[in-house]
Amino acid sequence: MSWIFEPLICAVIGGFTNYLAILMLFRPYEEKYIGKIKVPFTPGIISRRKNTIARAVGQVVAEHLIDISQITEILCSQEVSDRIVSGVLNYKVSLSDQQSEKIGEVVSGAICSIRIDKIVSEELKAYITAKISGNIIFSRLINEKMKEDFCNSVGERVKEYVDTDGKRKISDAVEMEIKEVSELTILEVLERYKIDSMEFEAVIRNKYKEIVEEKFVSIFETINISGIIENSINEMKMEELEKVVLKVMGKELNSLVVIGFAIGFLIGLINIIL
């Protein structure tokens, strides 16, 4: 039995050594000291290089995951355009008898009130979710908080633009004045003054599309995508980051342990033979 005992001992040593090496990638999470002397190899490699890893992941996501042209196409889709038009037409106007506002100003106020930032954020999040669904690594690396932070940032920038330049453009596009209107929706205002609602819808759709196509890219470029991802990873506790990495590379790391067992066993056999 001695011929099998030594290879088994070597296999256990080889597998355990690889397992310990994998643990040391993350642990300990913090520097350890004996008195004033720092213990070597603390913290673990990944724990020590967390900031560098976070920066690298952020750059990869920014360069390879986000396609501005595809996002623009989604925001200009019929479905999203319908949501914008529906929100505008069902916006309730509230004016006193003394007030007289241009319909363009009313419409721009309506767009600001329907949380276009939320619509953009939702659509962008759905796009990213669909984009990474077929990619095992991205789907495991990009968690919900990363998506929320990024999508909310884009939505807020779009909202800022709509509240300023976008609001002015829409207001200039529609010049008819509405008078003596109280507690009516935009659609009711159009019917009251016999304005073709289809033409009005076309104006809103065209202006919305124009804003997205002309300004979305420039808005997008002002957002530091890699920085958002990097900050999200840096804010994660090491326990969470360890779980994410093990979820992504669990099989591969387990394979290293198995390989350690196999190599150890082989070395034990060679020692016996020689």
Image (cartoon, rainbow, N blue to C red):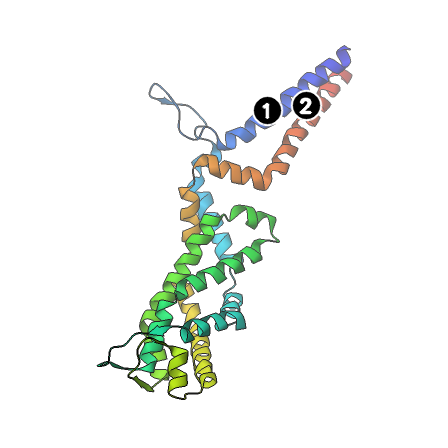
Query: In the drawing, does residue 274 fall left or right of residue 207?
Result: right
Identify the image quadrant of the N terminus: top right
Dot 1 corresponds to which residue?
17
Image location (x, y in percent) of residue 13: 63, 20
* Secondary structure category for the residue under label 1: helix
- Res 224 quadrant in image: bottom left
Three-letter code for the amino acid on which mark 2 is drawn: Gly
Q: How many marks?
A: 2
Earlier-in-chain disc, 1 versus 2:
1
In the rendered structure, find residue 264 and report the number of the disc placed on it: 2
Q: Is residue 224 visible?
A: no
- Res 169 quadrant in image: bottom left
Of 185 and 81, which appears nearest the observer?
Answer: 185
Image location (x, y in percent) of residue 198: 48, 84
Q: From this viewpoint, which residue is outermost toward the top?
A: 2
User: What residue is shown at x 51% (from left), y 29% (from top)?
Assistant: 24
Neighbor class of circle 2 (other Cα within 10 Å; few <14, some 14-19, many 20+) is many
